[in-house]
Image: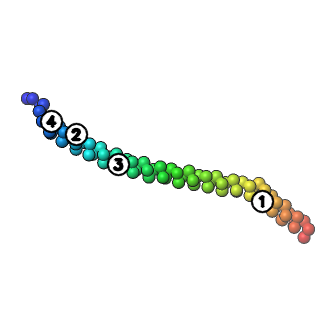
Amino acid sequence: MNREQDYTKREVDLFFKQIDGKLDAIHDQTSKTNGRVTGLEKELEKQKEQYSFIRGGLAVITVLIVPVLLFIVYQYILHK
C-alpha cells in the first residue's frame, strides 16, 4: 500500500497559508504576553528600590535614633 499522497500546489499553498495564520496568532499573543511580563518586571524593580529605601531608613533609625531615645530615657530615670 502506498501511503504517499500527491497534493496539488494549491493544496500545499493552502496548508502553508493556514500554518502562517496560526503562527501569526501565536506571535501576536507572545508579543502581548512579553509586554505584560516586561511591565511586571519594571514594577517589581520599582518595588525593590522602594524596599531598599525603607530598609535603609530603618537602619538609620535603629542605629541613630533608638540609642538617643534610650539615652534620654536613661537620663530621665537617673534624675527622677
On the image, numbered disc 2 is attached to which residue? 16
Foreground disc of the pair 4, 3: 4
Q: Amino acid at mark 4?
A: Lys
Judge left or right: residue 56 versus residue 39: right
Residue 24 x %, y %: 30, 45
Q: Amino acid at mark 2?
A: Phe
On the image, numbered disc 3 is attached to which residue? 28
Judge left or right: residue 5 versus residue 56: left
Q: Earlier in the sequence, mark 2 or mark 1?
A: 2
Q: CA distance from mark 4 to mark 2?
A: 11 Å
- Determine the image quadrant of residue 60: bottom right
On the image, numbered disc 4 is attached to which residue? 9
Q: Amino acid at mark 1?
A: Val
On the image, numbered disc 1 is attached to which residue? 66
Q: CA distance from mark 1 to mark 4?
A: 83 Å
Q: CA distance from mark 2 to mark 1?
A: 72 Å
Q: CA distance from mark 2 to mark 3?
A: 18 Å
